[in-house]
Amino acid sequence: MQTLSRQATPSSIIASRVADLDQTLAHAALRRVEAKEFVFIEGDPTTHVFRVETGAVALYKVLADGRRQIVGFAYPGDLIGLGAQGEHVMNAQAIKPTRLRCLGLATLHRSAAQDPALGFKLYEAVARELEATRDLMLTTGQRSATERVVSFLLAFSRRAERNGLDPCDFELPMTRADIGDFLGLTIETVSRTFTKLRTLGFIELPQASRVKLVDLDHLEDLAAGASNQD
Amino acid sequence: MQTLSRQATPSSIIASRVADLDQTLAHAALRRVEAKEFVFIEGDPTTHVFRVETGAVALYKVLADGRRQIVGFAYPGDLIGLGAQGEHVMNAQAIKPTRLRCLGLATLHRSAAQDPALGFKLYEAVARELEATRDLMLTTGQRSATERVVSFLLAFSRRAERNGLDPCDFELPMTRADIGDFLGLTIETVSRTFTKLRTLGFIELPQASRVKLVDLDHLEDLAAGASNQD
DNA sequence: CGGAACATTGACCCATGTCAAGTGTCGTGG
DNA sequence: CCACGACACTTGACATGGGTCAATGTTCCG
């Protein structure tokens, strides 16, 4: 979820049994969902928290007329369903075949009542998501189409790097429509921007979903707002 | 902070000593800041959490070239500074004379280590903010200028109502620039939209900062996306 | 009373949306 | 193995909402 933000430093003062959550999740029930299948939808009672094991999930809200805002993508290691009170206020839909660990909320609450470190850890997890969401807001609220797309690619690249993958050659799990609904742009604008970046020689696109970042320096400049003639 | 979302239901399973936070804050040091004065700025070490007692505070991030995204306004009762790890990643600036209660983070962490209910309460507080931020994202990412401004006015109206004030006649504490930077619009567009709503007879503007909502029904329609010819 | 900050209004323009063809690409069934 | 259909993506032509720039009005405070 912390898609557009740098990694937060885990500065918990309390660091006793914080492994508990991972522990519990490791033994939790596994659930498989196919691409396009929902993990939960708006209005569902919040019964579980999920951790993505493999695959990817899009989290989004929709307006009455169908306009859609993806508020984040969840990749392996990310938690989803946290922070909802009573019922879900958004949809979680797999964008590729995905495996999830499921943790009952009742269990979680019971544990949190006993273990202060756990409550604190939940707090930190949500705080990181909040941070990521605010960064995304800065992007959709203030940046141009090119800046948005480049920020998105660089954020994805950083994530790949953190996970020990090649930060300059990766497969995007989501469609252009997903990227558009994430960044507040249309499919066409996303596509045109990709083409522009390729023409400029900053990226390569061997296939639609495969991206190779060729000129990091210039990309960083674009993300920072060059071409606004400084 | 939950500016653009409906009130979250306080469904804490654990509801023992949750008054502790309010208790502590009631006795905490009071700080006064003038309009335009900062409560904290980006990069400041996170030493305190604040609760707004009176006044209003804008929370915002800035891009290198000065573009600004306000991610939320904090009004009396709202907590600010929660969720930051180590150092602040945004600015908190009073938009009118404001009084704040200050709570040392060390104290807060110490309490959270003892009282599971407190940790859980912090979690819920941040979760509510996350929800509000995501709603705002839906607005800035997908809605037209008119929809954004109307959503903003209606959200403000609901807040007034919750606080026992007149939901249809209120004083906006922030400037047009603040509203623009909150909604991802320019000052001029905000101003023109206000004028348009006045011309349509949906609102009145006795002064620039005073708004009277005259035709709630039509405003609700606009916020929902009427005029997109349905 | 004067000036600074804020707000409004107008004219113009451009980035991005919209609409409409095309062009892959992939999976399925003949 | 190929043909077909369904999607996803790209590209082009055109339209427009909202940004930019500039002038004017308003409010408030010293």
Image (spheres, coloured by chain):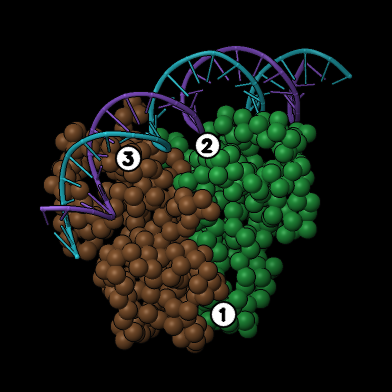
Chain colours: A green, B brown, C purple, D cyan
The disc placed on residue A185 is: 2
Residue neighbourhood size for the residue with mark 3, other residues' Cα within 10 Å, grouped as few (<14), some (14–19), many (≥20): few
Kindly report which numbered mark, 3 or 2, lies closer to the viewer in this rendering: 3
Amino acid type at circle 1 is Ala
Q: Secondary structure at mark 1?
A: helix
Q: State the residue at coordinates (62%, 81%).
A: A15
For the C terminus of chain A, the image quarter is top right
Disc 2 marks which amino acid?
Answer: Leu
Residue at point 77%, 45% (across, down): A169
Within 10 Å of disc 2 (Cα), the crowding (few <14, some 14-19, many 20+) is many
A197 vs B116: above or below: above
Mark 2 residue element = loop
Spatial CA span between label 3 and label 2: 23 Å
**Image point (34%, 49%), residue name:** B177
Q: Nearer the viewer, mark 1 or mark 3?
A: 3
Residue B135, given in percent of the width and then of the height, sits at 41, 51
**Quick one: label 2 or label 1, which is nearer the N terminus?**
1
- Is disc 1 surrounded by few (<14), some (14 to 19) or many (20+) residues within 10 Å? many
What residue sits 39% from the left and 58% below the top? B72
Chain under numbered label 2: A
- Return the residue at label 1: A117
Are labels 1 and 3 assigned to the same chain?
Answer: no
At mark 3, the secondary structure is helix
Percent coordinates x, y for residue A92 in the rendering? 55, 49
> Is any atom of residue A178 visible in this view?
no
Q: Which mark is residue A154?
A: none
Tell which of A48 and A3 is nearer to you: A3
Distance from disc 1 to disc 3, alpha carbons, whole Å, reads 49 Å
Q: Where's the N terminus of chain A, which quadrant?
A: bottom right
Q: Which residue is mark 3?
A: B188
Question: Residue B133 occupies which quadrant of the picture?
Answer: bottom left
